[in-house]
Every structure is written in structure tokens, then in C-alpha cells.
Image (spheres, helix red, strand yellow):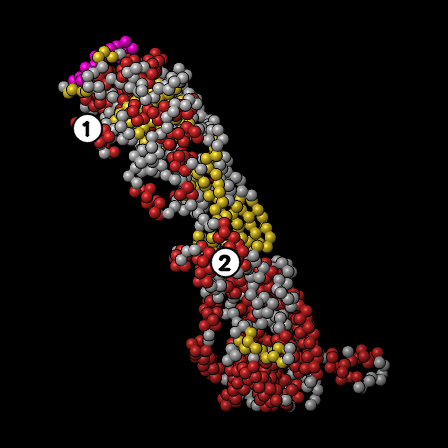
Amino acid sequence: MRVVREHRDDLVSRVRVLTAVVTGVLVVIATGFWFTQLVQGDYYRELAENNRLRKLPIKAPRGLIFDRKGRLLVENVPSYSLMIDRSRATSLDHSLWYAAGVLGRPVAELQQILHQYRGVPVFKPVLLAENLSLSEVARFGVEGFEYPEFEVEVQHQRLYRHREQTAHILGYLGEPSLDEIAKGNGAYQPGDMIGKKGIEQTYDAQLRGRDGERVVVVDSRGELLEEYKSIPAVPGKNLTLSIDLDLQQEAARWLDGPEKVGAVVAMDPRNGELLALVSAPAFNPNLFARRLQQSDWQALIDDPNHPLQNRAIQNTYSPGSTFKIVMETAGLTEKIFDTHTTVGCSGSKAFYGRPFRCWKKGGHGTVDAHSAIKLSCDIYFYTLGQKMGIEKIARYSRLFGLGSATGIDIQGEKRGNVPDPEWSQKVRKQPWYPGETISVSIGQGPVLVTPLQMAELTAIVANGGHKVVPHLIKDARLPPPEHVAFDEDALRTVRGGLVGVVNEPGGTAYGSARLPGIEIAGKSGTVQVIAQAQRTEEHNLPFKYRDHAWFTSFAPADNPELVVTVFAEHGGGGSRVAAPIAQALYAKYFGIDNGKSPSP
Amino acid sequence: MQSISGSITGSHPVPEERPRLRLLSSIDGGLILSALLLAAIGLATVHSASSEMLVDYFPRQAGWVAIGLVLLVISMSIDYHVLLDFSVVLYGLGIASLIAVLAFGVVHGGAANWLKIGAFQFQPSEFAKIATGLFLARYLAGLNLRVLEFRQILTAIVIVAVPMVLVAVEPDMGGAAMYAPLLVGMLLVAGIRVRLLVTALLLGIVLVSGVWTFGLKGYQRQRVLTFLAPETDPLGAGYQVRQSKIAVGSGELMGKGYMQGTQSQLRFLPARHTDFILSVLAEEWGFLGVVTVLGLFALYISSAARIAIRARDRAGIILVVGLISITCFHVLYNSSMVVGFVPITGIPLPFLSYGGSFTMINFISLGIILGVDIRRYVNR
């Protein structure tokens, strides 16, 4: 047969084998589909979703901050950033050349910026330029069709209306540190801006609100097709501060200028509300609202007066003569002296075999409790201190809140130091010398306080022993203040002395702090920076060797509404330099025109 | 059938009608049914795949299928022996058209593989493939041996190599590669020693490495490399593999529904109406859709194999094997490519992918196979 001659059986069996092989391969391929679609299906479904869905964050507008009278302190202003999606650029060089032309910046600079993003996936838009002008925004918008790789992103930037004047209260924003991101439990993402200092930091949770998210469907070209879902942003809460902008600005103006270093605290002694809190020098927080330039940062760091430091709470100083308030309250409460006990002052007195001088060379003659404060007689307080002993001085200092944080609602507060023999052994590793008690009695030596603690101390005297907690938020819900059981007569005597300081002829601040119509009570203090022997005429001294000046006060004396504490670093004499600043604040607060303005 | 027709027409059957009835009734149902179903699925999928494109390719593809059906009838009605007799001429024409392409070809996607005649563009490599198949079948059918001799194998290689090289220099590697299964399939069936096969395999490896080093253009090499590690460069050359795998995988068991595939409708899939038509189908119809299509191809291939086995003569067997080898390779390679098994190259899926020349050639091939089948009883 023909079939046999053609070796048909061989051909047929080969066809069968080949068919079997092909069928086998088909089964293998089907298995591949099974694996991809059924075993890995979930994985690829997610990838498909990632492909088509793009998450666009909706930033929650941060809460605004007002002063106690509803005046805006911080607002949000739009700021435009130029983003580039490198995967959509047909030629990166060409794109950069175009962007450089619009922005008026060298191409090389933009190339360098892009170079930093080498590790970032190309399809992830990266930041090319910030703070675009409106005309630049318009150009990228109009020509966007030709350059789809560019996208202008609107961000809200903090604008601190009063710049340096409120810098230390409000603080500023910055990108969260890795530590903060970890602690935030998902609340913060890298690239977010969070409060780094001041009110912005303490009340960050309320101010920031909650970011929303818009999920949109996009095609392969990234074109937005439709909305998939949208979670609206919850705006941050607005805050009203207890700060009175008028007082804040008045204080800031007095501390504005070269060689003006110090702090001013104005507080309502009835409830602890702070009406002004100024530290000088300050910084411009608007520099932090955008990404801080290295040069600006370096300037802040290098400034010998440390403008980033809030002197009202972060620096501690010897209280000087203002400490006499503590001494007299303690002495009278402890009945070591009574109001009529007198001490003779001849300008110098020996304690433990060493002479201690009064600030007044000729002496004050006979001094009692009232005149001791009014005249700020050192000999009276040396004598009182020696009789009372360091332990009691320390105990009363602590009752006045010294040596511990006041609890103000901004971070970074220093505790200061209340020295006693135990502290001396533990920290200095040396015994307490009796002579030191004498120095501490007039606020020198190792006793250290912050200006805020001084204001707190003054408020306690003014309000009759209520340890109010200083705070910056208006109508804060705080537990009722702790009441310290000082002797009522003692406090009354001290307050009388403080009234005398300002209002009675011979008072140390009689000429510098008196205000017609309002009775101010206060105490000045001068802290020596270098030893008496080396002193010359003050204005001849270099700035850093000049005395520190204190003035702490309240008014009206019979029903105190306001405590003002002024500290001027290297300011010179307390009554001469610090008292007029307090006086100006009272004038502002009570609406009295005293015709004075800050010296230039 | 005969007895039924006999009973209807009574005791006087009509002798003239008998060959025609026999001709139609002997058409293989599995082969024609699977081809028509695949073409119908292809039309629906092309419509979905091109819905987001500037033009809907559905009407055009429907036109190609219609022309294909006409060509099917024509190629079926011509006796394959006549085709084999004319195969020298067809082969010569195929070579000439390939040379013409090199000289006057229209460039599409980096390769000059289109020939324009008036308003009509076509790919000569597709037609040259069929012509080469016919010519090779004629040569091998004439060698009435149990096992081919080396010289004969070499002749067969030369017959295939001439058009293959011409296509390769266009350059159309995918098109050129199509000649390999034609040669291998026909040689295997015609008879080849195992020793020789191993030698050829080794030679092939040497050839492949040579082509890799000297023959491939940068982008082609990149494609192969990306195939090996597609995740490394998701928006570069690995993009296509990755997008295809995402489309296929995300279809899961039931698919996302017709016209609902996000990967294709949102234009993430490349060449989705042609080379990646199966990705679209896999995404929208899921694993069930894929199994259906692969099942239909299995039916098509096994039906063709059955036709080869029952073919009347050696020429018929070899011719059918050659034609079905090409289809097999297209199906196996394209589906492997879509699921990420092999590098991406322009090898479309028969009956499903959009394409004029390709659709026509598939129906011509089907027609020739059916032509072989209906003549299995006819004495020459």
C-alpha cells in the first residue's frame, strides 16, 4: 500500500508525540495563569489598585492663634512649591532648562537639587523650588500642557504677624524628628510640619487638626479621572491666648535694640494668666515657616546673645535685692523679727569675722521691716538671714515656688536653684559656709531664679499666698491654686514696703516707677557681675561686665491686677533701667499716658 | 448520513450530489468551531481593549475576520496538491516581497516590515511564512524516507533560512523566530535522528549567543534583561511585563467584568489590542476566561493534529504539521509572555489579536488544513 511506503505509522506517532508535548506546555502555561491569578491574585489586585488610585493628602488648616482681645497673632498664608515628577519628563535636561528660565535660577543649581533625590523612585514627585511668586505659578500653570512633569503644590505656611515680638511665646514649626514620628503613633509623617517650640509645640495636637485624604482614579498618564473617595480634613482648633498684644508689644519695644538683653513677664496675679512674656533678643519665626536656610540658622546659633533662648523661663539669674521679699516674708512669718524690730545700719557689719557691706556707703541708720524693703537695706537682711539660718531661707524660697518649675504651658522651663547645706554636699561636694547664708540673704550667691519664677513670687505676695500657675491660654481650666499659709500681717508689711519703694521719697524706685493715679508696689534688684573692687563708672564698663537689673512689681497695690517683672541682662541698676519698663507697661495697661517711650 | 439522505431521496440517490455532501459533512467540527469561537472572543476583547483608544478596532477587526472567512473558503477549495505544485512560485514571490520590504518598506515601531500597495499595507513576512511552509512541505513530502539524510536536512534549513534572515534584518526578531517552529515541526515529523537534534540544539545555543552579542539592538537586549528581573525598573523596560502581570493577576478567578479592567481601560497595558490581548481577557474574565481560551486552542491544535494523522498522504501530514506548528508556537509563546514566562517580543495570539495580515493568514492556514481534511478520501 501507498501508506506503508510513505512510512505513515512513523509520521502519525511523531504527530501524536508532538501534540502531547504541546498540550503539556499548554497545561504548564495554564498552571502559570492559575498561580498568577489565584495564588498571587490578592497581591496583584493591590498593585492594580495602587496603579489606578492616587492618594492626595488634604492638609488640615492649622488653628489660628489670637491674643486675649481677639487680635490675630498667627495666620496661614498659601505658599507655592514646584514639584517635578521625573517619570513624566521626556527630557529632564530640557525640563530643568525651562524651570530655570522661569525661576531665574541657574540650571546647575536645579540639577544639584535633583541630584539629591536620586534614591527616590522617579514617579514620586519631588520638591524643586519653594515660595514661588504668583507670576511663576501662572507660568507653570499655562505651560503645564507642554511640561506635564511640573506640578505646583499649594501649602499653607505660618505667618507670625508680629515676628520677633511674639517669637518666644508662639514658637515655630519644623519637620518632626524621627523620634517624634515614632512617638506620634502615625500622627506625623515625614515632611509634615509640627510645633517645635512654644504654644505651637504645647498645643500642637489641638492646632494641627486632622489631615484628610482624597483618593482619585488616574490613568497611566497620571490624569485624574474621577474621585474614588474623600475623607475631609478636620481643621485645627483656634486658640485664644491670655496675652495682651498691646502689653506684649510695649515690652518688646523696650527690649528692642542692640545691647538690649533680658525678659519681661506681665501676669495677672489673680489667676496666673500671662499678659506679656518677652525675651530679648528674639528671632524671626517666619524664617522657620519655610525650610530654614543654613545661613539663617548659623546666624541664630552664632549670636552670642542666643536669640533662640527664652530668657523668661530658660535662663536663671541671682535674684539680687528682689530676694528680700522672700526674706522678709519668711522672717516675719517665723516671728524671727516683728514689724517693729529695728536693725542699725552703718554701711557695714561683720559676720563670722568678715565685714559685709550695705549697698549704701554711709548706711541707713535705724531700719525696720518697712524701711528695710523700701530702702533695700542689706545690713537688715544680713542680720535677719543670720538669725533665720539657711534651712528656713530655703524652705520659704520653695514655698514661693523657687527651685521648681512654675508649670507654664510652654516647654523648656528651668528650675533655678535654692541652695541649702544638703544641696551643697550633693552638688558641690563641699560643706555650706555660714558666710554664704549672709550672701544669700540679699539674693547673691548660689540662689538662682528665672524671671518667670520672680513674677510668680511677686504674684504670691500680691494675691495673699495663692500659688497661681502661670499660663498663656485664656480661660484655661486649671485646678484652684495652692494656698501658702504665710502670715497675713507679714505679707501686708512686705506689700507696704514695696509700695514705699515706688511711692515714698527715699524709696529705691521712687523716681523711676511711680505712676500718677495708680499705686504701684515693687522691688528693684541689681546683680553684680564683677567684684566691687574692679568697678568704674558704669557706662565705661564693657557691656558684658555691667550689672544685671531686676524690677518686680504689682499694681494697684491694694487690689493687684497685674504683676510686672523686668530683667535686664547687663542693664545696670535695677531701679534705673528695669523699673521704667515696668512703669511703661502699667501705663499701657491702666491707660495712663506717662509720656515715656523706649529709649533708642 | 448517507442512509438518511438515501431514505429521504428514496431508492434513487443522486450521484452528482454525493461528493459535495461528503465534502461539507467531512469538515472537522472541532477545528472550525474553536477557530470561530476564538475569533468571536477576539472581536469582543479587541473592542474592550481599544475602547479608550483613539479608534475602536472592533469594526476593522470584524472586517479582517470577514475577509479571513472568504480566504478560508478559497484556500479550502483549492486542492493542496495544486498549492504544493505552485509552492515554488509562491515561495519565490514571498522572497521577492521580503526583499521589496527591505527596499521600500514602511517603518512601524522600529522595524520596516510593512509593504504599502496603494492604500493597502500588509506584512509580507506573514505570507512568506505560508509560502515557505508549502514549499518545505513539498520538498519533504517528496523524500520518501524513514529518516532524513543530513544533506536533505541542510536543504530544508536553507529553504527556511532565506526568508528568516530577510525578516530578521528588517529587523523583526519575533517574525523571524516564527520560521523556527515551522522548520522544527516539519523536520520532526518528516524524520530526524536524535543525534542530529542534539547537535542542532547545541548549534542553536551557539547561534543564540552569537545573535545576542552581534545581532540584537540595545533595546532588544534590554527587553530580554528586563524580562529576567522586571521588578528592578518598574517604569523602564520592565514596565510592560509588570503591567501585564498586574493585569493578569488582578483578574483573579472571575475577572473584573467586561470593559471593567482597570489595567486596560486606564491605559496601563501596552499593545493591549494586539500582543497583550490575552492580558485584557485575563483581567476582565479572570482565570475562567483564560482556561476557556487555552481550552479552545487545545481543541484547535488537537483537531488539526487529528487531521494530520488521518490525512491522505505524506504531503498532507507534513503540510498540516507545518501550519499548525506556527499556530502552536504563537499560542504558547504569546500566552507565556503575557504571564511573564518569556521575554516580550511582537508575537500576537492567533484569532484574538488585532491585525489584518495576521488574521488573514490564520484563516488561510485554517483553510489549507481543512482543505487537506476534506480531501482525505479523494483519490488523486
| Disc number placed over residue B23 in the picture, else none | none
Badge 1 crowding class, 10 Å Cα cut-off, few under 14, some 14 to 19, many 20 or more, is some
Question: From the viewer's perspective, is residue A427 above or below residue A87?
Answer: above
**Between marks 2 and 1 in the image, the one whose residue lies nearer the viewer:** 1
Q: Position of residue A6 (x, y in %)?
A: 60, 88
Q: Closest to the observer: A534 or B177?
A: A534
Q: Which structural element holds mark 1?
A: loop
Instruction: Identify which amino acid the numbered label 2 is placed on.
Output: Glu
- Chain letter belonging to callout 1: A
Pick the quarter of the image with the C terminus of chain A. Answer: top left
Pick the quarter of the image with the N terminus of chain A. Answer: bottom right
> Residue A475, can we see it?
yes
- Residue at 48% of width from left, 29% of height from top? A69
**Sequence-wise, which precedes: disc 2 or disc 1?**
2
- Residue at 52% of width from left, 89% of height from top? B155
Q: Closest to the observer: B283 or A393?
A: A393
Relative placement, left or right, of A279 versus A591 is left
Residue at the disc numbered 2: A149
Kindly indicate the quadrant of the structure image that contains residue B379.
Answer: bottom right
Q: Position of residue A189 (x, y in %)?
A: 45, 46
- Residue at 41% of width from left, 25% of height from top? A588
Q: Position of residue B244 (x, y in %)?
A: 54, 64
Q: Which residues, given as a range, are shown in magenta?
A: A332-350
Badge 2 crowding class, 10 Å Cα cut-off, few under 14, some 14 to 19, many 20 or more, is some
Residue at the disc numbered 1: A535
Kindly indicate the quadrant of the structure image that contains residue A496.
Answer: top left
Question: From the viewer's perspective, is residue A275 above or below residue B54?
Answer: above
Instruction: Identify which amino acid the numbered label 1 is placed on.
Output: Arg
